[in-house]
Amino acid sequence: MKRKRKQTIFAQLLTGFSLILVLLLTTIGYFTYRISSEVVLDKTSRFLTESVKQMNQKLDILLQEFDTLTLDIGFDPVLQRALQAPGDSEEISTFDIEKHLNQKMRFVGSDVLVLVMGSNNRYFSTSSSYYFLWKKIEDIKGYNWYEQALNNEGKIHWFSDMVWHLEKKPALVGIRQIRNWGSLDGLGIMLIALPLETIDNQFQNQQDSPFDKIQIRDSYRNIVYSTYEEEIGISKPENFLRREAGGDTGIQYSANTSRYWTSITSAYSGWNIIAYVKPEEIVGGLNRVQRNIMLIGLFGSLFALALAVFFSWSVARPIRMLSIKLNKTERGSLTPIRTRMRNREVEGLFQSFNQMLANLDETILDLSRRQISERQAQLVALKAQFRPHFLYNTLNTIYWTLHRKKLTEESRMVITLSHLLRYSIDGRSELVTLEEDIGQLNRYVYLQQLRYGDKLSVRLDIPAALYSALIMRLLFQPLVENAIVHGLETSEEEHWIIQITGFQEGGLLHLTVEDNGIGMNSDQSLQALTLPEDDADPPDLHTGIGLSNLQNRIRLYYGAEYGISLSDSSLGGLRVDITLPLEIR
């Protein structure tokens, strides 16, 4: 019987090492491509989604600015009187009203059209190169958006429509019902038209984005805006736009358009922003990663095979040892080779292998430290976001604990402090009603009276009819706090008095805060209303920089003709007079 010929050590080593090499490179290539694909897709999805969210925020800010503008126009006293007067009344001419409206629109940078149609058949329009064809309310009663405006409780309703500018032009249109500021009865309708250039200005920094197409659709699924102008004005509902407002959309693939898309629905306007991306923008990076992995694997295989042939002929044991160490490295073992070889070339190879393990170990440690640092930074940011809620929850827990123990006064102190802090950092609106700010003042005075007892007396004399007037948030509390800390605590009066009054004079609201403290001389009064330089120390005056900050806030918001004046009080201390425009909610 013929004896079977055995393979040589070279053939055995070459065959075995080749199989190990193919398996190793295939496994590494598969998992490298898979992990790289997940990372690329995840980061691309986050980037695209965040870009759409930013566009949605910009659009909301744009619409809300004009929402505020139309609200200010709708409650303008001059316009209110014109819409409440009989239709044939010439008490205020149409020319005067339109001139007044143009004055209120003077700070608007774009060519915006405002149209007012009163129930008394009065018609007013601002100067614009755009215009509507409607002249009275009867012309628009057949439109769905007109009924929406009537049922919207005075809020603005945004949609898209055509306006005239030498020819029909698409525009963003808002409509709201104008109500009597006293009875809230309807006085007419206000329409505002914004040219599409306003959106182009908002999205101009998106030109270098990977988006192939950006669409904005109103609540009627009409395309308000598109980077493809021929699509503007088309009604094109699609099933994939069933999203809750403000939700995290991610990216999906649409077979109809052969593109990836991501969208978000505005919680403010109900409009959809949809961004389309060509597949090559998404998967182009993945294809490059795949090609690079294949090339690296191919050249690596060829080079490793050549080394296997060379070392198989030279020595079997070092190759076997190296193969074993490679298998251990694949399983996660980074222990270097301790054996010393007589062959200089093999010894150099072992040293290189050991150095590779050391570098790999150092790289892994460095990456681990970086990941830990990034996670710690994320945790710090999250904790910073939760602190206000944690504070409110803690105060509420203390309140209920005291309440269950029937410690009425103590529980009231805690809940008052909670409401005081919540109101102070609430940034939803700069304007509040006079009644709301007085409520904040009462909470502050209650806590101060717990400290000072009957020594502190705060008197309030403001007509109830002014409680619905709109003022800046936190107007009273800083003034009363300054009066206590800087005017009363340093005085020798046994009984501290703070008198707060308010009255209406024409279209102005006058508010006064007086105390019987130490008062201020003329130089201190002048310096107290002047903001210090950025690098200057705060002046050591009666009110520090509180009055100057409040003065600056009022003038920035209302204008230079409004603000604070200081004088001697009849009570013996300081009198602070505040003049604001009267706005009734």
Image (cartoon, rainbow, N blue to C red):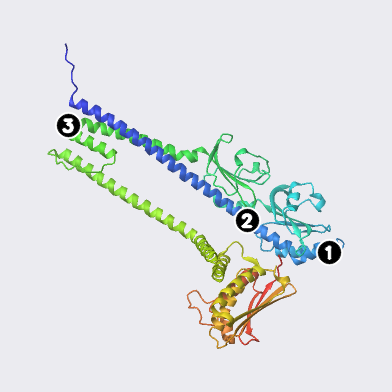
Reading the image, the residue beneath label 3 is: 316
Q: Residues within 10 Å of mark 1 (few under 14, many from 20)?
A: some
Residue type, label 3: Ala
Element under label 3? loop
Q: Amino acid at mark 1?
A: Ala
Say which element carries label 1. Answer: loop
Q: Give the foreground label among 2 and 1.
A: 1
What x and y, as percent, mark residue 65? 64, 59
> What whole-number distance in Å separates the C-alpha atoms at marks 2 and 1?
33 Å
Name the residue tied to disc 2.
62
In the image, is 6 to the left or to the right of 244?
left
- N-terminal of the pair, mark 2 or mark 1, is 2
Asked if the residue under mark 1 is in contact with the one under mark 2, i.e. CB atoms within 8 Å, the reply is: no
At 57% across and 51% down in the image, what residue appears? 55
Give the quadrant of residue 466: bottom right
Q: What residue do we see at 19% from left, 27% from top?
A: 10
Percent from the top left, x then y, of residue 297? Answer: 33, 34
- Report which residue position mark 1 lands on: 85
Q: Quadrant of residue 301?
A: top left
In this rendering, does residue 285 appear at all?
Answer: yes
* Nearer to the camera, 373 or 552: 373
Give me the residue at 16% from left, 33% from top. Answer: 317
Residue 3 location (% of width, % of height):
16, 15
Q: Quadrant of the C terminus?
A: bottom right
Work out whether residue 246 or residue 176 is closer to the camera in this orientation and state it.
Answer: 246
